[in-house]
Image (spheres, grey):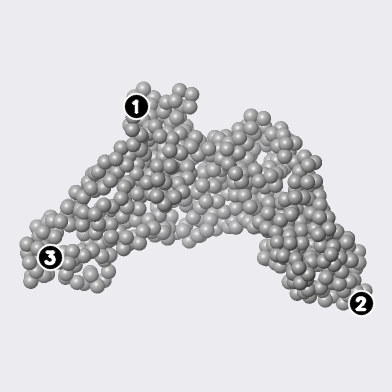
């Protein structure tokens, strides 16, 4: 049995399917990003009879209703939305959302003498040679006879037969064929994705989250189309506060809905720590509410899939949409969202730069929502969520097959409880060998985007540690202000002694310090600039550092995990210094983790 069919349909049939809902177009599936000139080129290709590519649809499975009858599944548009939107704009005359989320009209003008199409502008609008808008003619809002008569009235010198022929040809755009590839409902998401990539031949990444978004956007029976807007609008408001006015002015039904009431706080809220996109929002809501991690399961559940009987049932679809709605509403809830952000910051993760895994954040938020929903005391929730977040960052839990890991973790937590499963994870991954060897080895890196190093900085922020050679400036303030990262053994000094960038840029050679201190240290050896600091303390002069006692200096070095060898160190001691400091940094991370 063929898993797909390929056929041709005239433009007018395709548009009638869209109008009747037989092909479900995601209502706000990515904004219309084509330039108006591309719409013009599409219309010109149809007029000339050139091929315009394929539309790909995937038929939803037939769903069993409560009365036992089967409801035929709609076709969901998988690829070709930009072309479809272009046709509905130019031929049907519908307004479209541009990339700035503004509603616009795209009017295509036509010169029947030269058989030229162009985007309407003032010059064409004032020119008798151009028909201002092809839409009324193609869409049967004006008869061919009237269109010809009006054109000849303005251009009496033009050949009447020629104009009649050209305008009839223009009207026939609706009869031109468009290729449609219809994928069978029995195909799974991975197969559909593979087909999509092969047809496009561009290696286009089509994620399972895209399928979910198409799925919910095309659903009106369960309010999926409004859920889609909830996701898109929330993500938009995170980065564009002015978009709130667009919602109020242009989408009044949504602005009056419970969904809008839940997210409108973000119009004046701010978040530069956790900036989720639509995939992150779906990921959290789905993981938290369904205790699953694979988006393919969500597509199946929203289709009404009964995994045991291998059938599709309307009740399962309805229940799944309700659960997803609850999950999304809980995600955008102001109290939950802001408390989670505060929780993350209180763990020392004060900047997006310190969080290398978005999925660690996603899972931690899903876990937070789950434990809150289960009624666990807030203090316990904070303990478990902080530990889970830091543990998952340290062991790069979600860096590989993230969906499988998320699926396993949420199911295990659901089955065993977070306390028992976290303890099991710690025993398996955070034993003595990890803290004393694996973590120390992770810190042997010249990449600042290193999980272990970022967690070390979080530990420093958590401890409110001072900047290197500073009495009052905190590391957290420098990270927030993009302060200087200083080489303990100055870079030029090491380079002059034959060290390569990979050696002198080791993260164990980094400390945050004030810019003035960094400049004053310059190319001095550690023993030289520490000797100067001690000399200035003695003379009550504060040039390199504002530390005013030897005890203060020693405390500062200790809080920055600096081995005491630094007092007498030259480049010959550099390698041993790195070894010792990595051990101290790892010990700091371990102590920090145990305090969470």
For the residues labelled 3 and 2, say whether their Cβ atoms are less than 8 Å apart: no
Which comes sooner in the sequence, label 2 or label 1?
1
Residue that mark 3 sits on: 151
* Displayed quadrant of residue 115: bottom left
Residue 161 vs 26, above or below: the answer is below
- At x 72%, y 36%, the residue is 428
Residue 65 vs 540, above or below: the answer is above
Label 2 secondary element: helix
For residue 19, say whether it is visible. no
Q: Residues within 10 Å of mark 1 (few under 14, many from 20)?
A: some
* Displayed quadrant of residue 372: top right
Rounded to the nearest angstrom, the CA distance separating label 2 from label 1 is: 91 Å
Furthest residue to the right? 538
Q: Quadrant of the C terminus?
A: top right
Residue that mark 1 sits on: 70
Residue 409 vs 475, above or below: the answer is above
Label 1 secondary element: strand
- At x 77%, y 62%, the residue is 509
Q: Where is residue 437 drawn, in percent x and y?
A: 78, 46
Furthest residue to the front? 498
Residue that mark 2 sits on: 539
The foreground one among 125 and 398 is: 398
The foreground one among 320 and 553 is: 553
Q: Where is residue 22 drawn, in percent x and y?
A: 30, 39
Q: Residues within 10 Å of mark 2 (few under 14, many from 20)?
A: few
Q: Is residue 149 left or right of residue 19?
A: left
Q: Is residue 530 left or right of residue 116?
A: right
Q: Is residue 562 left or right of residue 277?
A: right
For residue 54, say whether it is visible. yes
Which comes sooner in the sequence, label 3 or label 2?
3
Q: Residues within 10 Å of mark 3 (few under 14, many from 20)?
A: many
Q: Where is residue 354 drawn, in percent x and y?
A: 67, 55
């Amino acid at each position: 049995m063929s898993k797909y069919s390929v056929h041709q349909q005239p433009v007018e049939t395709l548009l009638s399917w869209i109008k009747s809902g037989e092909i479900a177009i995601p209502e706000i599936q990515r904004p219309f990003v084509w330039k108006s000139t591309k719409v013009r080129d599409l219309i010109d290709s149809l007029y000339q009879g050139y091929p315009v590519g394929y539309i790909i649809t995937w038929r939803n499975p037939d769903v069993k209703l409560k009365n036992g009858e089967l409801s035929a599944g709609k076709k969901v548009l998988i690829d070709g939305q930009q072309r479809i939107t272009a046709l509905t704009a130019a031929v049907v005359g519908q307004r479209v959302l541009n990339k700035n989320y503004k509603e616009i009209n795209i009017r295509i003008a036509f010169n029947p003498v030269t058989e030229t199409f162009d985007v309407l502008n003032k010059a064409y609008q004032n020119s008798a040679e151009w028909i201002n808008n092809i839409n009324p003619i193609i869409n049967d809002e004006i008869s061919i006879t009237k269109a010809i008569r009006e054109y000849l009235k303005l251009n009496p010198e033009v050949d009447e037969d020629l104009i009649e022929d050209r305008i009839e040809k223009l009207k026939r755009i609706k009869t031109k064929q468009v290729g449609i590839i219809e994928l069978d409902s029995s195909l799974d998401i991975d197969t559909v994705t593979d087909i999509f990539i092969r047809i496009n031949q561009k290696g286009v990444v089509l994620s399972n989250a895209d399928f979910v978004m198409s799925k919910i956007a095309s659903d009106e029976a369960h309010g999926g189309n409004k859920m889609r807007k909830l996701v898109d609008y929330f993500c938009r408001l995170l980065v564009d506060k002015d978009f709130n006015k667009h919602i109020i002015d242009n989408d009044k039904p949504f602005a009056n809905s419970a969904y809008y009431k839940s997210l409108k706080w973000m119009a004046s809220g701010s978040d530069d720590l956790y900036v989720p996109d639509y995939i992150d929002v779906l990921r959290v809501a789905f993981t938290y509410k369904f205790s699953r991690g694979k988006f393919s399961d969500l597509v199946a559940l929203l289709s009404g899939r009964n995994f045991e009987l291998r059938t599709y049932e309307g009740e399962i679809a309805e229940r799944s949409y309700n659960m997803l709605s609850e999950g999304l509403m809980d995600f955008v809830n102001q109290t939950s969202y802001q408390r989670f952000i505060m929780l993350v910051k209180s763990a020392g993760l004060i900047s997006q730069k310190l969080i290398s895994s978005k999925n660690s954040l996603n899972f931690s938020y899903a876990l937070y929502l789950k434990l809150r929903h289960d009624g666990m005391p807030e203090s316990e929730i904070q303990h478990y969520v902080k530990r889970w977040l830091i543990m998952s960052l340290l062991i790069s839990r979600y860096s590989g097959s993230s969906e499988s890991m998320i699926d396993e973790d949420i199911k295990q937590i659901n089955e065993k409880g977070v306390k028992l499963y976290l303890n099991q994870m710690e025993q398996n991954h955070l034993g003595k060998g990890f803290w004393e060897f694996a973590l120390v080895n992770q810190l042997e890196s010249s990449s600042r985007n290193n999980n272990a190093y970022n967690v070390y900085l979080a530990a420093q922020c958590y401890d409110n540690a001072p900047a290197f050679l500073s009495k009052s400036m905190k590391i957290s303030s420098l990270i927030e202000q993009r302060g200087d990262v200083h080489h303990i053994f100055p870079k030029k000094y090491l380079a002059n002694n034959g060290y390569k960038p990979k050696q002198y840029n080791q993260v164990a050679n980094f400390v945050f310090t004030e810019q003035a201190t960094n400049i004053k240290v310059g190319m001095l050896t550690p023993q030289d600039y520490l000797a100067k600091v001690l000399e200035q303390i003695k003379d009550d002069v504060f040039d390199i550092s504002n530390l005013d006692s030897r005890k203060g200096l020693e405390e500062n070095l200790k809080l920055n995990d600096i081995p005491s060898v630094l007092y007498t160190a030259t480049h010959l001691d550099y390698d041993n210094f790195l070894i010792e400091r990595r051990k101290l940094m790892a010990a700091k991370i371990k102590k920090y983790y145990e305090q969470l």
